Image: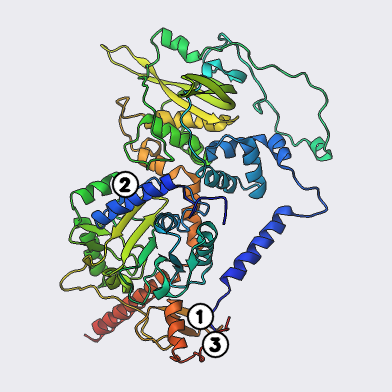
Amino acid sequence: MSDYNFAYLDEQTKRMIRRAILKGLAIPGYQVPFASREMPMPYGWGTGGVQVSAAVLTPDDTFKVIDQGADDTTNAVSIRRFFQKTAGVAVTEVTSEASVIQTRHRIPEEVLREDQILVYQVPIPEPLRFLEPSEVETRKMHALEEYGLMHVKLYEDISLHGDIATAYAYPVKVEGRYVMDPSPIPKFDNPKLEMSAIQLFGAGREQRIYAIPPYTQVVSLDFDDYPFRPTKADHACDLCGAGDSYLDELIVDDKGGRMFMCSDTDYCSTRRRHGHVGAKGVPYDEDAA
Amino acid sequence: MYVAVKGGERAIDNAHAWLGEERRGDKSVAELGVAQIREQLSLAVNRVMAEGSLYDPDLAALAIKQARGDLIEAIFLIRAYRTTLPRFGGSNPIKTDQMQCDRRVSATFKDVPGGQVLGPTFDYTHRLLDFKLTAEGEIGNVTVGQPTQNATPHVMSFLDREDLIQSEPSGEATPPDLTRTPLELPATRALRLQSLTRGDEGFILGMAYSTQRGYARNHAFVAELRIGAVAVEMDIPELGFAIEIGEITVTECETVNQFKGSKTEPPQFTRGYGLVFGMTERKAISMALVDRALRWKELGEDDVGAPAQDEEFVLYHSDNIQATGFLEHIKLPHYVDFQSELELIRKLRREAKANIMQEAAE
């Protein structure tokens, strides 16, 4: 253990964050201002997610951290270690074993349950930010439910490109009220935002927390004649053969040769453990490093 | 055949070990002590204390050593430490007119009670590299100046007596704490000053400079710049009176700016204010100029659309820990997002090419 309080933050601060989380759950999709603390990792590295995780973790929890879907990316490792050190909680890479999952840029492929919490790291919580740079203005727009500008943007995309040119951080409307940024997840993940688990979003630098309670309606913005379509690379995973998972594209030789593999590393290795083998995969080996 | 890339944990451990080695540098050169940094790089220490919002020269010196001299990294270390400290309460306002001044200059009056005290300034040094310092030459004995002993009245108070300077409303209310409550706009002046004093020196300097060059110009005279030690007092409820809990060195800058008025309303000068931990003159002057520019609304001036007038722009972008974090995070993995953009751009290109073919065929 360490000299710091359980999960690093002092109890007063955790209480303040929990109040913001509860308010966020009560008003799905609404961005609640909170007094974000300076964390011992930089803004932009997931300080919002880390503060939310610190506020919800209990000693009995099992914690999982993914970045880009993977447990082994350096920043996921770093955040996992942080809570191992400051909270002493059990950690896992197995999605189904985790009670709290902190994520950056992905929703796990495996369907989450009611007894799980998914914590997102959010860089820019404001879906209208790149249409209107002023926070004073965008808060007004949310209050008045004035979302015309967003539809104009999507329409302009279609007239310019023939399609909505947003591939990640695709805006959604939550429970028919607030337009929300789902954090920079690929739009492939958007349909999963309607789930049984609690979803909490933390933006540290921007001092905002928001939430989607279980079973909340989450609609990706679109038009009747240009319906929303989640997309992924038109391949199967080269390691496990999955055809339904989001894929990373790797450049594997000097000639620009490509291969595709699941971005969700736990999903991929679980499938391989169960004997699935993709086009370039090898049978699963427990010790493979 | 492909084996998935792993090894994040080992990479991190190795990176940290290497970083430690780089920090130490050539082992045949004596290691730098924290006390040496505190005593001999004191202006760096001051900046770290000011922007770290924690007055502790030893910790600031340690942070500079640990950060290999990267001051923003050092400020970050201090901020991250500061946020874990318990808060006992708020001190009483410091009394800068009681300051023991090491330096005190006025640009508006040739002489004022308390006098002009030049102090340890670079101002009139010729910027010639002093090669004697490479030989680690000790300085000889110099007569040590004494800081002013008596209370030194603020230059502003003389203008105030004549009603020439616009007066500020006084209040007993404790201003909100930027580090404990989220910034919401519009911000009070107290909150703006709090934000400016911990803002990045370079950013505040650039903003201040822009006002001098004409973006929301409000010509500033430095009525007074003073640097020295002040006592910090705090009311102790159990005692029922205030006791001195310590002493800090601060830099205070008060500017006199152009006036407003009309035929019926006698014109008055307006103020800008800067107060920063330590000997941090450039920052304090910059702060006063930016403070003044941000006051356009309450002083009934026009919004000329200058960056330094835009409270949201200035306050949201002055914090170097926030800025450097978000800026540098773009080097972290983004391959999931990039992948989705790749798919999108390939699809759009396919469609555009199909359209071209079709048009050519028609």
- The verdict on a common chain for dots 3 and 2 is yes
Taking A16 as reference, is A148 above or below it? below
Between the residue at mark 3 and the residue at mark 1, the CA separation in whole angstroms equals 23 Å
Question: Residue under mark 1: which chain is it in?
Answer: A
Question: Residue under mark 2: which chain is it in?
Answer: A
Which badge, 3 or 1, is on the more N-terminal residue?
Answer: 1
- CB atoms at circles 3 and 2 under 8 Å apart? no
Q: Which mark is residue A285?
A: 3
Between the residue at mark 1 and the residue at mark 2, the CA separation in whole angstroms equals 40 Å
Q: Where is residue B67 in the image (x, y as percent from the top left)?
A: 63, 49
- CB atoms at circles 1 and 2 under 8 Å apart? no
- Displayed quadrant of residue A74: bottom right
* Residue on which disc 1 sits: A251
Taking B139 as reference, is B27 above or below it? below
Which badge, 1 or 2, is on the more N-terminal residue?
Answer: 2
> For numbered disc 3, what is the local secondary structure?
loop
Indicate the amino acid at tag 1: Ile
Q: Where is residue A56 in the image (x, y as percent from the top left)?
A: 39, 57
Q: How many residues crowd around disc 1 within 10 Å: few (fewer than 14), some, or many (20 or more)?
A: few
- Is residue B216 visible from the viewing direction of this image? no
Indicate the amino acid at tag 2: Ser
> For numbered disc 2, what is the local secondary structure?
loop
Q: Position of residue A173 (x, y in %)?
A: 22, 62
Question: Residue under mark 3: which chain is it in?
Answer: A
Taking B26 as reference, is A170 above or below it? below
Residue found 45% across the figure and 24% down from its top: B237
Between the residue at mark 3 and the residue at mark 2, the CA separation in whole angstroms equals 53 Å
Quadrant, the C terminus of chain B: bottom left
Residue found 38% across the figure and 78% down from its top: A246
For residue B212, side relative to residue B280 (left or right): left
